[in-house]
Image: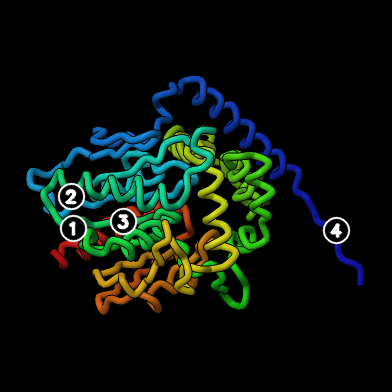
Amino acid sequence: MSQSPIQLNPVETLHELTEMHRKLVEGMRTLSRMRHEDIQVGTTPKEPVYREDKLVLYHYLPVVERPFPIPILIVYALVNRPAVADLQPDRSLVRNLLAQGMDVYLIDWGYPSRADRYLTLEDYIAGYLDTCVDVVRERHGLEKINLLGICQGGTFSVCYAALYPEKVKNLTVMVAPIDFHATQEGRSGLLNLWGLGLDVDSLVEATGNIPGELMNFGFVMLKPLQLNFQKYLDALEVMDDEQKLLNFLRMEKWIFDSPDLAGEAFRQFVKDFFHENKLVRGEAEIGGRRIDLRRLTMPVLNIYAEQDHLVPPPSTIALGEHVGTSDYTLCAFPVGHIGMYVSGKAQRDLAPTIANWLKARA
């Protein structure tokens, strides 16, 4: 049976084209008025309190007279920049935590150079991260502080807390990969498939450090139509709205600000975690010390995104099967991986969820 041809309404088509042209013209006018400082990210006031090599440890200026006495140290991934946690004033996990009375620190890993090619996971976790924890402990006169690990930084934080449980009061992890072979409805996550099939030895030998642009391309190609085409088509719809256009440009600025990755640390992470899934098998080692997740005896808050295409929920949820604590809380948000930082629901509920959980365990 033949199908009827699609009927186009010339009047409606002309109207849509005219409206698109109007938005483009207005968008060009808006762009011409914008200044470089209008598209800045990570603008919450902060001060550097420690530097080592490329790393900077920042302390955000409290916004309440007497902040919560146990500070939070935010540990972000090596991929992309931690500014996603402070994208803009009305989309900022950092600002929201400060408004809840938290005292917040953050590790900025910086931009590795060729001199950093041979940095290992031991250097990052048992070196830089441990030093930053000690700096915060000393500044506040505490034996233990709170850790908040995000994405790969959550994996790092889990490893760290298992190695140094005596220094971690409470552990919060957010959209963090734990079981790298976990499946959802019988399918592996896209990022897990990408890492599992990666010839990491050839890549590191060819490039030394892993170019940030290459990693960015890999992430974009996980959802090529949506992330290469659809988002820019959607951007046309907001070209005549200055605030929405600024929101879009700030996100683009963050996405394409991709540091290179230290080659040896990347090799080790891909082999031990993606290829061999050593973390949940109890075989991962940092500097010859085995990561035993049963040593996570402190309270643990595990937050995942139900629509996460990078870190599938089962990968994060698996943490609960291996921890040694009876005080374990699992919390879901109906968002995607990036939505955890920028969606309206996350902006409203995420920081209070974390802050109230921590205050209840003071």
User: Is the Cβ of the residue at disc 3 closer than 8 Å to that at disc 1?
Assistant: no
Q: Quadrant of residue 63?
A: top left
- Residue 292 vs 200, above or below: the answer is below
Q: CA gap, disc 4 to disc 2?
A: 71 Å
The residue type indicated by label 3 comes to Leu
Residue identifier under label 4: 5
User: Is the Cβ of the residue at disc 2 closer than 8 Å to that at disc 1?
Assistant: yes
Dot 2 or dot 3, earlier in sequence: 2
Mark 2, Cα crowd under 10 Å, few <14 / some 14-19 / many 20+, is some
Q: Residue at x 59, y 44 (%)?
A: 216
Q: Residue at x 47, y 39 (%)?
A: 254
Residue 21 visible, this orientation: yes
Dot 4 or dot 2, earlier in sequence: 4
Specify the farthest residue to the right: 1
Q: Secondary structure at mark 4?
A: loop
Residue 91 visible, this orientation: no
Q: CA gap, disc 2 to disc 1?
A: 7 Å
Q: Quadrant of residue 160?
A: bottom left
- Of labels 4 and 3, the one closer to you: 3
Residue identifier under label 1: 144
Q: Quadrant of residue 286?
A: bottom left
Quarter the N terminus occupies: bottom right
Q: Residue at x 31, y 56 (%)?
A: 148
The residue type indicated by label 1 comes to Lys
Please state the horizontal and vertical placement of residue 118, each as a whole percent of the image. Answer: 51, 42
Specify the farthest residue to the left: 66
Please state the horizontal and vertical placement of residue 68, each as a whole percent of the image. Answer: 13, 53
Left or right, 185 with reference to 73: right
Residue identifier under label 2: 137
Residue identifier under label 3: 148
Mark 1, Cα crowd under 10 Å, few <14 / some 14-19 / many 20+, is many
